[in-house]
Image: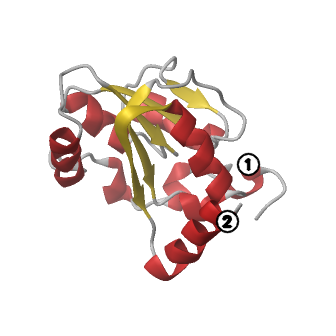
Amino acid sequence: MPYDIQDHYGILPKNYWTKKYFTVDKNYFSYQIDIAKRLINFQPGIKALDVGAGIGKCMVALNRSEFDAYSLEPSTTFRDKALEKMNLDSERLKLGMLEELNYAENTFDFIIFGAVLEHLYNPSGSIKRAMKWLKPGGFIHIEVPSSDWLIPKFFNLFSN
């Protein structure tokens, strides 16, 4: 892990993703959103937080699905591209790392970690922090590239 997150993610988005990635398909993240809506007894306007927005594709999908979407992104260049390309509200897309940002307790019904836990300095601490922001009855959606990585992290979460 780099000492400063910008050392790793301060690169231009076009150098991180392929050109095709900058288009948001109408079905992007729709399967996960449909499941979330069933699990949390969805009502339009309930709050969702995407941790690690990248260029904002998940936030766009959440907005399209009538969530009140928020996000955070530690990379200045990625956040700038999300604001420019996806036309997102700068007040709802915070710049900063999860460990540094604050949200009120019991704010979100749905929190998403989409291929982001493996990039965090303290994954178990980050989940604990996010759980404070989660409303009772809400849930956290976690995607990681390797389940072999996930299982040890959960053991660490509950052993700390």
Which residue type does callout 2 highlight?
Ser
Image location (x, y in percent) of residue 159:
67, 65
Q: Is residue 123 left or right of residue 25?
A: right
Residue 99 on image: x %, y %: 70, 41
Where disc 2 sits, the SS reads helix
The reply, left or right, for residue 160 in relation to residue 134 is right
47 over 24 or under it: above or below: above
Residue type for callout 1 = Gln
> Residue at coordinates 37% horizontally, 25% vertically from top-left?
87
Q: Is residue 5 left or right of residue 15?
A: right
* Residue 54 x/y as whole percent: 49, 46
The C terminus - image quarter: bottom right
SS state under label 1 = helix
Residue named by callout 2:
159
Query: From the viewer's perspective, is the residue at label 1 or at label 2 nearer?
Result: 2
Identify the residue at horizontal 31%, vertical 58% (top origin). Answer: 20
Q: Residues within 10 Å of mark 2 (few under 14, many from 20)?
A: few
Instruction: Locate the N terminus by quadrant.
Output: bottom right
What residue is shown with label 1?
6
Q: Please determine whether, in this image, residue 147 is positioned above or below residue 61.
A: below
